[in-house]
Image (cartoon, rainbow, N blue to C red):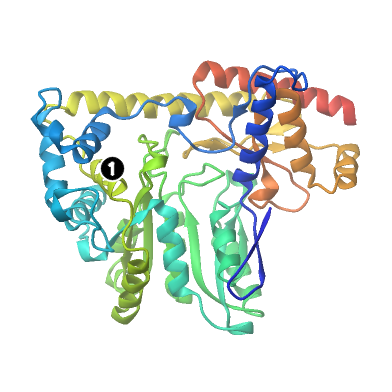
Amino acid sequence: MWFIPSSQGRRINLELAAHEFVIRAPVMQASLLQSSGIKKPFTEVIKANIGDAHAMGQRPITFLRQVVALCTYPNLLDSPSFPEDAKKRARRILQGCGGNSLGSYTASQGINCIREDVASYIERRDGGVPADPDNIYLTTGASDGISAILKILISGWGKSRTGVMIPIPQYPLYSAAISELDAIQVNYYLDEENCWALNVNELRRALNEAKAYCNPKVLCIINPGNPTGQVQNRKCIEDVIHFAWEEKLFLLADEVYQDNVYSEGCQFHSFKKILYEMGPEYYNNVELASFHSTSKGYMGECGYRGGYMEVINLHPEIKGQLVKLLSVRLCPPVSGQAAMDIVVNPPVPGEESYAQFIKEKESVLNNLAKKAKLTEDMFNKIPGVHCNPLQGAMYAFPRIFIPSKAIEEAKAHKMAPDMFYCMKLLEETGICVVPGSGFGQREGTYHFRMTILPPVEKLKILLEKVKDFHIKFLEKYA
């Protein structure tokens, strides 16, 4: 938990739970490497706290790296080591850059040809639903777009202050941004007993209660879910869109895990597509911003900080303000824009790189599906642990039983019980996960979030260690 002074001198509480353990884990890893360090009962720290695919050993997609390399060092365009389809894309991207260089600033919305490629990708993904490049904004990861749109939407004071509805559990970016912008966080709870389903009756309860102290104007959806891993079905999305239309709410659809769907019978449906199919009364009136990223999916390119948002039905004057706001940061990272282009404009059948690209993509996604099932099955064999099906994304969010004696000890240390549990897990096994209290959870329930990204063999070792730890934890605090 950090407190960051704002420009007005107030203290903003930013609970970025996933990153708190980033501080502790390297310290512990360093102590293992020092001969004078305290002897630990493990030989390495396994950082399963954050969805950083390449750090966990996932191999980059060759074609994406080839294009970015060509864009970064155009002299390679003469090299026979690179395929012609990669060169073709690199030349097109460079032609959109000032001086044909990634080192130049771009338009604040991003390179025009890449925004055109994003629009074409959305149209293909959504079965022909039209997409306008002018509604596409390239961003510094999805986080940048989410923060920007919230800045535009938040206003008012006191009871008129903007309320932002977010799922609980949620990705802490949302609670942090809401706090930083001095808006009002309005929690709606996902249904853990029903595989973390989103229930419109719960949305209505949260909205009606919030009207007493704020002006709820924004509804955030994470699909597939982080940290919960659920995939919303079509009927659920239709219900949410109808609710937003009825209550005149601005929809934020965080869809960065749209490629990460594993369970049979589950399918990703974009909010944009369902909105269009519900007819013009909805499609022409519901305001929607949806987000995608290079960081997740099969790419895992977190470090490039590439992303985009598509915003529809935004009033022209507000759209003008959004462009002004984005122009303050000049432009998103240009190498990240190039990486985003390959996500939306990959090799197609008949091109030289297609076979290798499809093989690598399917390998990553099939491996993740295998690890999702392995994680779910192994957690559910541990006494006092329950894990819902991991339908999508790249995390498990198991519910853990914590005995009352451990809860009392946690209170004595001024810690949330699941924080206490996770610290003990880290100190005794070297496994770094994130307490559920950092994401929000129903009172009286305890969870932790763990990524499924480690290689299969390391993941098995990790899960066995968690099992042994949890059984000993229950025995100690029984």
Tell me if 303 is positioned left or right of 156 in this view: left
The percent coordinates of residue 406 (x first, y second) are 87, 37
- The kind of residue tagged 1 is Ala
The foreground one among 292 and 124 is 292
The percent coordinates of residue 444 (x first, y second) are 78, 49
Query: Judging from the image, what secondary structure is the residue with disc 1 in?
Result: helix
Tell me if 216 is positioned left or right of 44 in this view: left
The percent coordinates of residue 165 (x first, y second) are 56, 66
Query: Residue 295: in sight, yes or no?
Result: no
The foreground one among 372 and 448 is 448
Relative to 254, is 30 above or below? Answer: above
Query: Residue 187: in sight, yes or no?
Result: yes
Residue lying at 46% horizontally and 55% vertically, measured from the top left: 236
Q: So how many labels did they put on this image?
A: 1
Residue lying at 24% horizontally and 28% vertically, measured from the top left: 357
The image quadrant where one finds the C terminus is top right
Tell me if 215 is positioned left or right of 234 in this view: right
The foreground one among 140 and 123 is 140
The percent coordinates of residue 299 (x first, y second) are 35, 36
Relative to 122, is 310 above or below? Answer: below
Neighbours of disc 1 within 10 Å: few (<14), some (14-19), many (20+): many
Judging by the rendered image, the residue that carries numbered circle 1 is 339
Residue lying at 31% horizontally and 71% vertically, measured from the top left: 323
Relative to 82, is 119 above or below? Answer: below
